[in-house]
């Protein structure tokens, strides 16, 4: 398998607090990985450190993406390399429509002008598949959207931008069963042998309709257990207490 993302012994934190404490993770092309863990374990920190969010300080370690060390790249440069991240609480951005946002982002990533007719045809296809209101793309980005509409909009962005690696940070939080199924459907539409997905979640429901290669348990800034999809089921039944004891 060809490596896509390598995280090597990363120590990182925010606001003078150590959060990631020697984290290691390798994701190959064609794989779906899931990160689970108790609150405060460092799951969202991991996502932000990969994208080099300036609010987080990487003290040591390396992040290699598609064969290139991206430690010192800016967030927008990392995104242009092909890493996409959805947010737990997507921001509302007045003054720019979802349609124009997607066209601009697609243009920046591809480096080529977007062909309007082809782009709108593709957009309509994805909107139909995700059971979205087509009028939403004409409205300001996420402004006045419900929680479910914002999360579907994140999946729409992922499908349109076609990143090499999609990091989904609790995209399923606050969603009902039908919306979770739609999000899972969008992930399956995106997934292929040349890209990869990293899902951060507390909810086993989003995994029910996905093929998951690895589930990792993150406790106190380290991955303390890795298994297959059955590990997520075990966590749902038993919680994280036994894994916390491993770290103590």
Image (cartoon, rainbow, N blue to C red):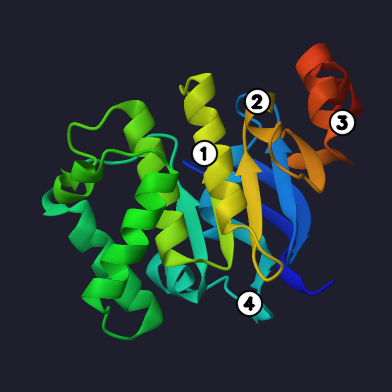
Left/right placement of residue 241 relative to residue 14 reads right
Query: CA gap, disc 3 to disc 2?
Result: 13 Å
- Quadrant containing the N terminus in the rendered view: bottom right
Viewer-proximal residue, 32 or 15?
32
Q: Please tell me whether mark 4 or mark 3 is closer to you in this view.
A: 3
Report the disc number at residue 69: 4
- In the figure, is residue 60 to the left or right of 176? right
Rounded to the nearest angstrom, the CA distance separating label 1 from label 4 is 31 Å
- At horizontal 56% and vertical 57% (from top left) the residue drawn is 190
Residue at horizontal 32 percent and vertical 86 percent from the top = 112
Residue at image location 63% in from the left, 77% down from the top: 69
Residue highlighted by disc 3: 230
Q: Are marks 4 and 3 in contact (CB under 8 Å)?
A: no
Q: At numbered mark 3, what does the secondary structure look like: helix, strand or loop?
A: helix
**Do the residues under discs 1 and 4 have CB atoms within 8 angstroms?**
no
- 160 or 92: nearer the eye? 160
Give the label, 2 or 4, closer to the camera: 2
The secondary element bearing badge 2 is classed as helix
Pointer 4 local density, CA inside 10 Å: few below 14, some 14–19, many at least 20: some
- N-terminal of the pair, mark 2 or mark 4, is 4
Q: Nearer the viewer, mark 3 or mark 1?
A: 1
- Is 242 positioned to the left or the right of 235 in the image? right
Badge 3 or badge 1: first in the primary sequence: 1
Which of pointers 3 and 2 lies earlier in the amino acid sequence? 2
**Camera-side residue of 37 and 210:** 210
Query: Would you place residue 81 above or below residue 91 in this image?
Result: below
Q: Which mark is residue 205?
A: 2
């Amino acid at each position: 398998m060809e490596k896509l993302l390598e995280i090597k012994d990363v120590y990182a934190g925010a606001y003078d607090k150590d959060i990631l404490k020697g984290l290691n993770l390798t994701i190959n092309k064609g794989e779906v990985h899931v990160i689970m863990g108790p609150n405060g374990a460092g799951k969202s920190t991991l996502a932000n450190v990969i994208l080099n969010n300036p609010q987080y300080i990487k003290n040591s370690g390396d992040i290699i993406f598609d064969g290139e060390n991206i430690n010192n790249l800016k967030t927008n440069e990392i995104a242009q390399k092909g890493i996409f991240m959805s947010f737990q609480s997507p921001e509302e951005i007045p003054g720019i429509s979802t349609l124009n946002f997607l066209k601009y982002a697609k243009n920046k990533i591809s480096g080529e002008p977007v062909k309007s007719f082809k782009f709108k045809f593709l957009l309509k296809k994805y909107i139909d598949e995700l059971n979205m209101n087509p009028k939403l793309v004409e409205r300001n980005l996420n402004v006045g959207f419900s929680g479910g509409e914002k999360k579907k909009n994140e999946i729409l962005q992922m499908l349109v931008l076609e990143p090499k690696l999609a990091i989904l940070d609790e995209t399923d939080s606050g969603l009902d069963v039908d919306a979770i199924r739609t999000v899972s459907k969008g992930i399956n539409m995106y997934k292929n042998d040349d890209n990869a997905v990293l899902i951060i979640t507390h909810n086993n429901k989003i995994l029910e309709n996905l093929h998951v290669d690895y589930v990792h348990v993150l406790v106190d800034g380290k991955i303390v257990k890795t298994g297959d999809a059955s590990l997520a089921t075990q966590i749902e039944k038993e919680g994280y207490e036994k894994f916390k004891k491993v770290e103590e």
